[in-house]
Amino acid sequence: MAHADVTPPVNIYHRMWGAATQDLATGVHRPLRATVTLLAPREGDERQFIIALDHCVL
């Protein structure tokens, strides 16, 4: 299992909805994280990855 912080920087453009009054992020409410888990059998070469992203829009 591996994980990484994928939180965007402050002041990034983030107009996420039409009624927003600001175009730039002013801070971070909660950090965003990416997590990957690799599943592999003891024999054979078939691998499966489980990827989880803390994100609201992809």
Image (cartoon, rainbow, N blue to C red):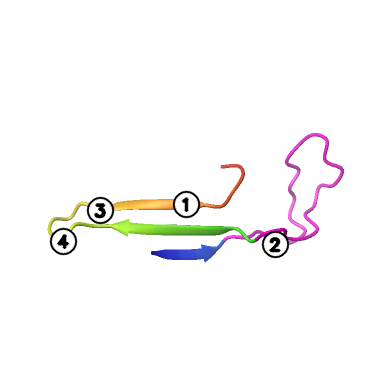
Looking at this rendering, what residue extends furthest in the top direction?
A: 18
56 relative position to 52: left or right: right
Q: In what element is the residue under mark 2?
A: loop
Q: In what element is the residue under mark 4?
A: loop
Mark 1: which amino acid?
Ala
Q: Are marks 3 and 1 in contact (CB under 8 Å)?
A: no
> Does residue 26 lie above or below 19 as drawn?
below
Mark 2: which amino acid?
Pro
Looking at this rendering, what residue extends furthest in the right direction?
A: 21
The spot of residue 28 in percent (x, y) is: 72, 60
Instruction: Point out which mark residue 47 bears.
Output: 3
Magenta-span inclusion, residue 10: yes
Mark 4: which amino acid?
Arg
The spot of residue 21 in percent (x, y) is: 87, 43
Residue indicated by mark 4: 42
9 relative position to 33: left or right: right
Magenta extent:
6-30
Mark 3: which amino acid?
Arg
Of the image marks 3 and 1, the number of the one nearer the N terminus? 3
Of the image marks 1 and 2, the number of the one nearer the N terminus? 2
Residue indicated by mark 2: 9
Q: Looking at the image, is mark 3 or mark 1 nearer the viewer?
A: 1
Q: CA distance from mark 3 to mark 2?
A: 33 Å
Of the image marks 1 and 4, the number of the one nearer the N terminus? 4
Closer-to-camera residue (25/32): 32
Instruction: Point out which mark residue 52 bears.
Output: 1
Q: CA distance from mark 3 to mark 4?
A: 10 Å
Q: CA distance from mark 1 to mark 2?
A: 20 Å
Q: State which quadrant residue 12 falls in.
A: bottom right
